[in-house]
Image: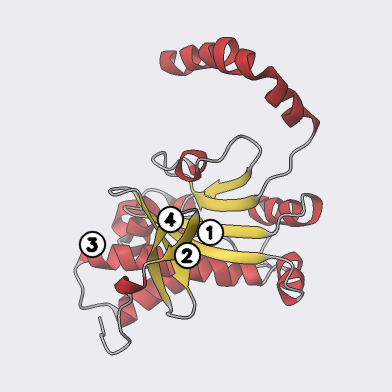
């Protein structure tokens, strides 16, 4: 806690004091570029990962970067998404999973969350992920299953996102876009889901442009 308090003091006396004009503008309004839905894991910092400044990302975080389907009890996730789209006019929504995800570990191994009933209930929104992993990839070792669960869960939550009226209406009118990302903590790489190849592929940025690394495409004939 001491380090946090010291950080508050440094922020006020150095960072804020030296950027008063910037923070004055922030105080007037927020115009974020994207809604960033990711895990609560302390090892992930969306602003650090994307090098976004304050005000550029509208962030929604929870265990497992989960988006409950529309029609369930209204909660913070749906309210946050609706506000981002309707009030802030956000045009891009990113669902970002990550390697070594504790929520996905608990999903695959329920013994790890046996004493956490709230976590267990929350992960019901990712049961489709578990079913996909166990049915299609049951021959793989646990770590391989975990990596696949992280990826499949992003896709499942994107499908949940599509059930929200505010999202569905704007997707139909091509007014917003949704994106699936996976961040690999160990290497700093970000993998982006490419629907044309039905795979997560590494992002490459060069000469002011970005694209995915097509050399990493796994041919459909290769089965897990």
Residue 85 % position (x, y):
74, 56
Marks 1/3 in contact by CB < 8 Å: the verdict is no
What residue appears at the point 79 percent right and 56 percent down from the top-left corner?
A: 86
Disc ID at residue 143:
3
Along the viewing direction, whichever of 25 and 198 lies nearer the viewer: 25
Residue 67 % position (x, y):
58, 61
Mark 3 or 4: in front is 4
Mark 2 or 4: in front is 4
Q: Considering only order in the chain, which callout, 2 or 1, is on the residue closer to the N terminus?
A: 1
Q: Is mark 3 on a helix, strand or loop?
A: helix
Disc ID at residue 205:
4
Query: Which image quarter is the C terminus in?
Result: bottom left
Spatial CA span between label 1 and label 4: 20 Å
Marks 1/2 in contact by CB < 8 Å: the verdict is yes
Q: Is mark 2 on a helix, strand or loop?
A: helix
**Residue placed under numbered mark 1 in the picture:** 95
What residue appears at the point 42 percent right and 16 percent down from the top-left corner?
A: 3
**Residue placed under numbered mark 2 in the picture:** 154
Which of the 4 image quadrants contains residue 52?
top right
Spatial CA span between label 3 and label 4: 29 Å
Q: Considering only order in the chain, which callout, 4 or 3, is on the residue closer to the N terminus?
A: 3
Query: Which image quarter is the N terminus in?
Result: top left
């Amino acid at each position: 806690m001491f380090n946090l308090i010291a950080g508050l003091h440094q922020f006020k006396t150095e960072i804020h004091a030296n950027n008063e004009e910037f923070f004055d503008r922030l105080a007037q309004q927020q115009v974020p570029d994207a809604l960033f839905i990711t895990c609560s894991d302390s090892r992930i910092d969306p602003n650090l990962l994307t090098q976004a400044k304050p005000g550029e990302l509208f962030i929604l975080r929870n265990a497992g970067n989960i988006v409950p389907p529309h029609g369930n009890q209204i909660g913070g996730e749906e309210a946050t998404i609706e506000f981002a789209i309707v009030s802030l006019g956000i045009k891009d929504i990113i669902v970002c999973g990550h390697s070594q995800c504790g929520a996905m570990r608990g999903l695959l191994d329920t013994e790890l969350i046996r004493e956490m009933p709230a976590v267990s209930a929350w992960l019901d929104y990712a049961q489709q992920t578990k079913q996909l992993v166990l049915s299609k990839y049951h021959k793989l070792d646990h770590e391989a299953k975990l990596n696949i669960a992280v990826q499949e869960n992003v896709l499942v939550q994107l499908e949940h996102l599509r059930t929200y009226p505010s999202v569905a209406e704007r997707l139909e009118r091509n007014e917003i876009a949704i994106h699936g990302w996976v961040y690999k903590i160990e290497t700093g790489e970000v993998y982006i889901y490419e629907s044309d190849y039905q795979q997560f592929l590494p992002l490459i940025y060069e000469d002011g442009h970005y694209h995915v690394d097509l050399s990493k495409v796994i041919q459909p004939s290769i089965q897990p």
